[in-house]
Every structure is written in structure tokens, then in C-alpha cells.
Amino acid sequence: MALELPSYPPLEARPIKNTIVLFDVDETLTKARRAATPEMLQALQALRQKVAIGYVGGSDLSKQQEQLGTADRPVTSMFDFCFSENGLTAFKMGAALPSNSFIKWIGEDRYKELVSWCLHYIADLDTPIKRGTFVEFRNGMVNVSPLGRNATNQERLDFNEYDNVHKVRETMVAKLKEKFGHLGLTYVSYPYTLYLSKIPTHNVKRPPTPTSGTTTGNPANYPHNSFSIGGAISFDVFPTGWDKTYCLKHLEDEARKPGGVSYTTVHFYGDKTMPGGNDYEIYSDPRTKGHSVDGPDDTLRQLKEEWGI
Ligand SMILES: [Mg+2]
């Protein structure tokens, strides 16, 4: 039986005007890859009575549905704005907003040139072993792995050690930048966030829990553990600016719509807010008021303190 969904004042009638509160998902609203607790869902409901709320997550909608929604409750009904894949897939009050994708942006010809170059480059590498899936196409990016993504955990660890010495990825990225500099692409290798969603829990050795405000995806901050989670074996390539700040475009579009709300105050809560972390850009963007959290319990504490819920 479907649960009755709570009702909220329309966006233009929320008591706290022209304001939206955005949240990262993993380690901000939920434990990494886990479902949100009833306390968190309750807090979000209470907050939504006062102010517009949204999430901005790097993963796709199905992942956020799994973590935040239920069979009876689509995640798109739980937030005023849902920004999946940093906003490439977006919903407002359950209705889809214009979407975007890497291939739409770059075009088939240039994409083909990029992928062919990567495959040629990897084919000519004399690395100790190669496995499969060297290039993985995703909606918002392409993921490139000189080892191949379907390597075992041990093979990933071994590659990482090799890569630390021989700088395979670093050199490849430098050459890509040289060759495709005109395309305006960003190259990123997150040492553990990406792998947390890929590796079964029993293989995951979590990095030490950082103290509040120091969370980061920068490998230098996890000298012993950053590569223990299956090993970082790849890097992502995506258009510059397609980090979490991408979702702010949708809010700017809102302001231009007839009767649309102009969100002049945008709060953002995230856990990886230091340089190198995937929340850093939006957290430090002049258009937002950034809040750094140390896990969902800390988010709850801050929400209660700051919003009186
Ligand atoms: Mg996070």
C-alpha cells in the first residue's frame, strides 16, 4: 500500500524566501552507498516545510533512488530539486528538466577521435599486465583505465604500485591535455570515492575517518590508504565545469522562468569540501554558502542547529 506523501507549501510560498538548501548524498545525507536513516528523512521533511531543498549527487538517479527513496516513494518526490550526475539529469517537483550528456556536448566525431587516441595509446603501453574495458563510456564522462576496469582487486593494487613509480596515468593525462587542449576537458582521478561505489563491501578498507572539515579526495591526505580500496586504476574525462556547480545552471534557469523563484541564497552541505574532493567546487563557489560536514550525523546536528528543525 502506498504511503501518504506529506504535502509542502508551493516553492514560491516557502517561509524562507529565495533560498534553497542543497545536499551532497554519500557521507552527507547517508553513509556511503547506504540508505538514509529515518531521522534524516524526517529532518529533510521538516526542512522542506520551511525552505526549498535539493540534492546534488555524482551518481545516476537509480543510485539515489536506492539510497533515499523506497518502492512507494520516488526520490524525485522527496526533494524540490533532484540533481543526479551533478545535474546532467535533473528534476523539479518530480518533473524532468533539460538533460545533458558528454556525447551531446562533445559530438560523435570528436568523441571518436578522443577514444581512438586513448585506445592507440594504451595499446602501445608496455605495462606488466592488461585486462579489459580500457574506456568506459558514461553519460557525463568517459572513464579511461590503462589497466582495464575488469581487473581483480589484487591486479588493481599491483597496478597502483606500478603507476606510483612509472606515472602511467599522469603521463597519459599530460599527453591528452597536449593533444586535446582545445576541447576544454578536465581530467580527474578520485582516489577512493569512485571505488567505494564499485567494490563489494568486504573488500573495502575505508580510509581513516577524517576530522570535520578536512575530508578530501586528495591522495596526499591518505598516504597509506588512498589506494587500498581496490586501487585507483583510471581517470575520468569530462567537460570543464561539469562538477557539482553544473546544477546551479538549473537554478539560474528557474529565475528566468515566468513566475520562477530566484534563488539568491544557495546553501550547500557536503563532506568532500577540500581541494581535490568532489564537493570542493560547489562548496567554494561564490554563488553558494558552503557547509562542510563529517558524515550524516554531523549533517543532522548542523541542520538542527542552523534551521531550527
Ligand atoms: Mg560525499
Image: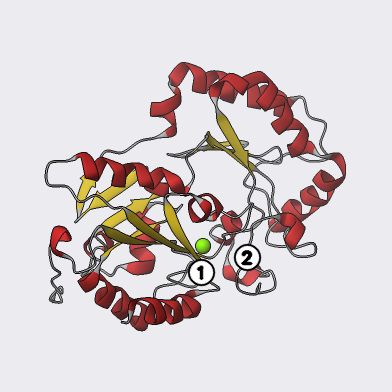
Image quadrant in which you'd find residue 229: bottom right
Is residue 37 visible in this depiction of the protein? no
Label 2 vs label 1, nearer the camera = 2
Q: Which mark is residue 27?
A: 1
Q: Provide residue 183's location: percent of width, then percent of height.
A: 54, 22
Q: Quick check: 97 left or right of 56?
A: left
Disc ID at residue 215: 2
Q: Is residue 28 left or right of residue 44?
A: right
Q: Position of residue 302 (x, y in %)?
A: 44, 77
What SS does tag 2 mark?
loop
Q: Residues within 10 Å of mark 2 (few under 14, many from 20)?
A: many
Please state the horizontal and vertical placement of residue 123, each as a whole percent of the image. Answer: 72, 26
Residue 206 position within the rendered picture, expressed as x and y whole percent measured from the top left: 66, 70
Q: Is residue 118 left or right of residue 26?
A: right
Please tell me whether mark 1 sits on a helix, a strand or a loop.
loop
Work out whether 245 lies above or below 80: above
- Seen at 65% across and 46% down, the residue is 189
Q: Nearer the viewer, residue 201 or 284?
A: 284
Q: Amino acid at mark 1?
A: Glu
**Identity of the residue furthest to the right in this view:** 165
Q: Quadrant of residue 77?
A: bottom left
Is the shortest distance between ligand 1 and the CB of mark 1 under 8 Å? yes
Horizontally, residue 50 falls left or right of residue 103, namely: left
Task: Residue at 44%, 32% (x, y): give it.
Answer: 102
Residue 73, by quadrant, is: bottom left
Locate the C terminus and report the quarter of the image it occupies.
bottom left
Colouring scheme applied when the structure was drawn: secondary structure
Q: Label 1 neighbourhood size at 10 Å, few (<14), some (14-19), many (20+)?
A: many
Q: Amino acid at mark 2?
A: Thr
User: Does residue 43 show up?
Assistant: yes
Dots 2, 1 in contact, CB < 8 A: yes
First-in-chain label (2 vs 1): 1
